[in-house]
Amino acid sequence: MDTLDPPVDDSIEGVSADTTLAFTAIPLGNVNY
């Protein structure tokens, strides 16, 4: 998994939404719960 690698134009469309939801859900989940 290219987690450390910066998002690429091609990856932005598919990974951006997924990573954004994942990264936002994790920290928010820890704070809320």
Image (cartoon, rainbow, N blue to C red):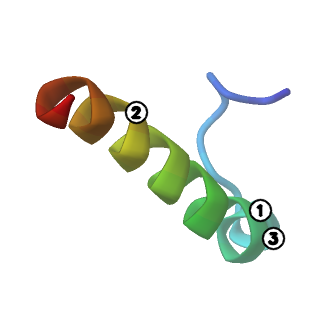
Residue for badge 3: 10
Indicate whether 20 appears above or below 5.
below
Residue for badge 2: 26
Q: Amino acid at mark 1?
A: Ser
Whole-number angstrom distance, CA of label 3 to CA of label 1: 4 Å
In this view, the residue farthest toward the front is 33
Residue under the image location 40 percent in, 33 percent down: 26
Whole-number angstrom distance, CA of label 1 to CA of label 2: 21 Å
Counting residues from the N terminus, which is met first, the one under dot 2 or under dot 3?
3
> Which quadrant would residue 11 be assigned to in this image?
bottom right
Q: Any mark on residue 33, and which?
A: none
Are dots 3 and 1 in contact, CB under 8 Å?
A: yes
Residue under the image location 67 percent in, 30 percent down: 5
Residue under the image location 63 percent in, 51 percent down: 7
Q: Amino acid at mark 2?
A: Ile
> Which quadrant would residue 10 be assigned to in this image?
bottom right
Mark 2 vs mark 3: in front: 2
Q: In the displayed structure, does residue 15 sit left or right of residue 30?
A: right
Are dots 2 and 3 in contact, CB under 8 Å?
A: no
Quarter of the image for the C terminus: give it: top left
Q: Any mark on residue 11, and which?
A: 1
